[in-house]
Amino acid sequence: MTEFFADIAPVRFEGPDSTNPLAFRHYDPDEIVMGKRMEDHLRFAVAYWHSFAWEGNDPFGGQTLIRPWQPQDDMARARVKADAAFEMFDILGVPYFCWHDADIRPEAATFAESLRNFEEIIDYFLAKMESRKTRLLWGTANMFSHRRWMAGASTNPDPDVFAYAAATVKTCMDATHRMGGQNYVLWGGREGYETLLNTDMGRELDHMGRFLNMVVDYKHKIGFNGAILVEPKPQEPSKHQYDFDAATCIGFLRKYGLEGEVKLNLEQGHAILAGHSFEHEIAVAAAEGMLGSIDMNRNDYQSGWDTDQFPNNVPEVALCYYHILRAGGFTTGGTNFDAKLRRQSLDATDLIAAHVGGMDICARGLKAAAAMIEDGGLEAALRDRYARWDSDHGQGILESDLDSLFARVLAGEIAPQPRSGRQEMLENHVNRFV
């Protein structure tokens, strides 16, 4: 064990009556929910960037989290960070983790040197994975932090930056493939604009579409069997990002012929910033057959930015998993905790406790969602509300034309009478389970 986690034992399921802050009260990996192990439903992953690369800074203050592997500027410290990370995966018993390239290797003076650092740490990861169950849910490239990306990556006005982004993604896809990753994610953190005064939006969107087609072509070239996912977010850091929300991304994918190749990685905090609920974004993606994976977190509803807090609201989480289960559940995707400690939560114990709490909240939400599905009340209400569309009368309306429908309405043959949506009754029904 590293010094960082030396006094923390593996987390175990102790049941709802446990008062141990470092024990699962609701997450039992082997509990069967709708015919499947809970671990296999939820497919938890730890985010390397928030748990091990973030230093506790915010827009108004610098580092508060002092870790043994900081400063993160050489390979020795990168290996110490990896040691600590895999120890935490063991303590939590998580099946997956996720990374950006910049999280796991120090930036060097040249691309070639950075690549050597990256490949060395991937080898180090693979050696650790040989004796562990934890696998890679997805890899991705950080193309938003370094100053080279300040005007975007694939949407940059400089073609050399586009080429540099392509080279970066290739290396990350190669590593994800080597590690048996389930997915590869692209989040366009600066694929957008700060002002339209210096932005050719049509050109930038075309370049972004071309870039994503290159990614898909390369996936097939190397035989990567995982899913390619894009992650919506409306703003921050860019004033307006092109991947605003699920519906915007789906329209973009259809425009560039990618709807059969690319799915979505959805984040709760990003949904809130877009003015949506998380269940809305999941339902939109599911309706289009493009639900891939989720980043589970929450925002502070009094703050106007992406605070990336651990989830703590069972009713919200339950409705998210309700729509995921209705869509058939995850295939290559899972539940990645794209969440970070608060700046005042300094200790290793805090990091473990945050994940334990998040995993328990998700377990409670999953069980509530499964119970709602097994009860069937919401499905019955939905079928009843739309039942007339399945009748000969409803189908006849769909197959008609404006002139015919006008004549029937004018003759009084069709005279609609409003029916209650019963929202309060349905909300009360949900509250029986959460």
Image (spheres, helix red, strand yellow):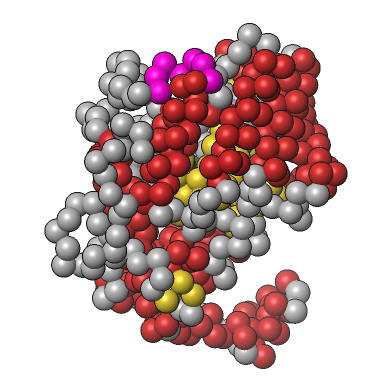
Q: Is residue 239 visible?
A: no
* Residue 22 percent across, percent down from the top left: 23, 51
Place residue 54 in its image quadrant: top left
Residue toward you, 282 or 54 = 54
Residue stretch rendered in magenta on the structure: 69-75
Name the residue: 38% across, 43% down.
88
Q: Is residue 245 left or right of residue 88?
A: right
Q: Is residue 386 left or right of residue 345?
A: right
Q: Is residue 140 left or right of residue 217?
A: left
Residue toward you, 17 or 212 = 17
The extreme bottom residue here reads 392
Q: Is residue 67 visible?
A: yes
Name the residue: 68% across, 37% down.
175
Name the residue: 41% across, 54% down.
93
* Residue 334 percent across, percent down from the top left: 52, 56
Place residue 421 in its image quadrant: bottom left
Residue toward you, 230 or 167 = 167
Q: Main secondary structure of the magenta part?
A: loop
Is-magenta flag for residue 228? no
Task: State whether residue 55 is above or below residue 266.
Answer: above
* Residue 292 percent across, percent down from the top left: 60, 55
Task: State whether residue 254 is above or below residue 191.
Answer: below
Name the residue: 74% across, 32% down.
170
Q: Quadrant of the C terminus?
A: bottom left
Q: Quadrant of the N terminus?
A: top left
The extreme top residue here reads 109
Task: State whether residue 180 is above or below residue 207.
Answer: below
* Residue 401 percent across, percent down from the top left: 75, 74
Image mark count: 0
